[in-house]
Image: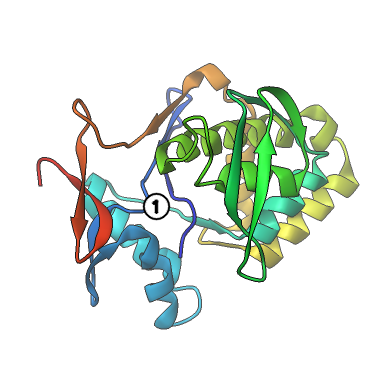
Amino acid sequence: LSDTMFFASYDKTNNRAGIVSIPRDLWVEIPGRGEGKINAANAYGEENGAGEGPKLATQIVEQIFGKKIHYYLRVDFVAFEEIVDEIGGVDVNVTRTFSDNQFPTEDYGTQTISFEAGMQHMDGATALRFARSRHGSNGEGSDFARSARQQKIFAAVREKLFSKTTLLSPSTVGKIMKTVQKHIATNLSTLELIALAKDFRALDSKSITNHVLIPGENEPLYETMSGGAYVILPKAD
């Protein structure tokens, strides 16, 4: 299942970008499978063949937003941890102190993780835990709080990845490229990735708009149950 899904749009002419976090529990029509949660799209696609998961997920997100999606990137947990470590970790401002006593372990158990409010330096494993936590205390137990944390991580990684310290280190760039080749699936060519990296490096953080899709009175989505499962649906069908 997809742990996280972003829909990103880049306006090259005006040098600005927008990033929308898509709720994993969004109830959608999955071609060939009927209705289901959007985070299952990648898994269903992979059943049709290796590399088909991102294509199916892309098709569904295109239908939701009514926009043509030209490119996709699928990043696994190993890539996330390795890239954060390879750039020397990231600095993230933790909004509020919280603990999560249901964080999953690799052997299908649980453990307790905690974060203190304030600026924190995180290595790859810590950043992944911060981004994945779903059962945190102090208002951090929802997927929507989690999406906001993920966008913070995304911004911190972007800033460090395109810093002079990273780009002027051939060994660091070489390690990152090896990680990309091994753990990231994309329909972007190497030349397109390099061109996009150059554009994103020049992109000011103030030119990036972040939005988290959430249910609520003044939001486009609402929460309900379907077949005993918690799901999210659009108010306007």
Given residues 68 and 184, the one toward you in this image is 184
Name which residue type carries label 1: His
Given residues 103 and 210, the one toward you in this image is 103
The relative height of residue 110 versus residue 199 in the rendered view (above or below) is: below
Q: Dot 1 corresponds to which residue?
A: 70
Does residue 47 appear left or right of residue 37 in this picture? Answer: right
Given residues 209 and 116, the one toward you in this image is 116
Helix, strand or loop at mark 1? loop
Spot occupied by residue 35 in the image (x, y as percentages of width and height): 21, 67
- Taking the spot 24% from the left edge, 76% from the top edge, the residue there is 33
Given residues 156 and 126, the one toward you in this image is 126
Work out whether residue 199 can be spotted. Answer: no
- Taking the spot 62% from the left edge, 25% from the top edge, the residue there is 202
Does residue 114 appear left or right of residue 144 in this picture? Answer: right
Q: Kindly indicate the quadrant of the structure image that contains residue 30.
A: bottom left
Tell me, what colour scheme is on the image? Answer: rainbow
